[in-house]
Amino acid sequence: MNSLTAALIAEFLGAMILIILGDGVVGAAVLLEKEGGWVVITTGWALAVTMGVYVSGKVSGGHLNPAVTLALAVRRDFPWNRVGPYCLAQIAGAFVGAAIVYFDYFESFRAFETANGITRGAMIDGKLAGPAAGGAGIFATYPAFDNLVLNLFSEFLGTAILVLAVFALTDPRNQSPGSNLTPLLIGFVVWSIGLSLGGLTGYAINPARDFGPRLASAVCGWGTAVFQSHGGYFWVPIVAPLAGGLAGAVLYDFAIRRFLPPR
């Protein structure tokens, strides 16, 4: 098996685990009304990222995020001919992970819809009707407010912080962590972003994490409404994280890396 094939399998599995555990904790909190709310959701996502990076890191680098992959191609030496395949593997893994969550929570979705009088995929005033975007919010992100500029900025900001921190934690010239702690600390970064900034847009901060599950929710019954809801919001968690990731990488290199001592 060549190195690219192995890396794509690792990215696929890492992204799949990320979504199974991440969307799964949202399902538990929303569909089953388990206690803990936002703190539990952000903690679950942090652990999901940690596990995904631990699974894939040694083989593929544990990107799991097109924003990270693009930033590494632009600011580091990641091969450009791997960017497209990596992104596709990440989206595919996220899609499969979301499909597995849907199957696992199948009865919970039916009970949730019955309890809240939800017709799957129905829209009211341009938005998916019902709590958590009619259940589709288990999979993808939908904004709390219909302010396009601020929603773009929130996703941009969160991803910029994420990639800046990833670059700092993985830079051998900086105070990079030892004892294989990097995936855990990246999970802490995601946890902090979620607690501090995530409530406005659901902090996708990862195009694959949002688009793959959104596509899965369309296939699982919510249809094209997942792309039309909230003014066609679906493109925001794709474009803003890609731009934010590049900004975070440039900021780290300009403000920190150029002042570090040589290895």
Image (cartoon, rainbow, N blue to C red):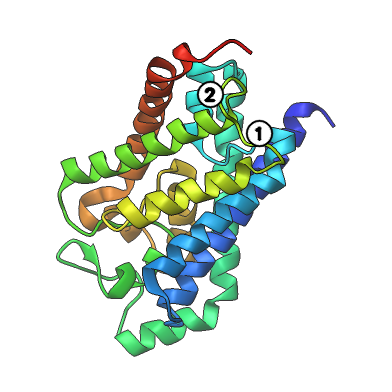
Q: Amino acid at mark 1?
A: Gly
Question: Would you say 78 lies left or right of 42 here?
Answer: right
The image position of residue 208, as x and y in percent, is 49, 44
Q: Is residue 186 above or below residue 26?
A: above
Question: Would you say 184 lies left or right of 240 here?
Answer: right
Q: Which residue has dot 1 on it? A: 61
Q: Which residue has dot 2 on it? A: 72
Q: CA distance from mark 2 to mark 1?
A: 11 Å
The image position of residue 74, as x and y in percent, is 48, 17
Question: Would you say 168 lies left or right of 9 here?
Answer: left
Nearer to us in this view, 223 or 87: 87
Quadrant, the N terminus: top right
Report if residue 178 is visible in the image. Answer: yes
- Residue found 57% across the figure and 29% down from its top: 175
Q: Secondary structure at mark 2?
A: helix
Q: Amino acid at mark 2?
A: Leu
Question: Would you say 1 lies left or right of 7 here?
Answer: right
Quadrant, the C terminus: top right
Nearer to us in this view, 189 or 63: 189
Nearer to us in this view, 82 or 219: 82
Nearer to us in this view, 137 or 144: 144
The image position of residue 67, as x and y in percent, is 46, 33
Tell me which corner region of the image, top left, top right, bottom left or bottom right, holds residue 59: top right
- Residue found 65% across the figure and 41% down from its top: 11
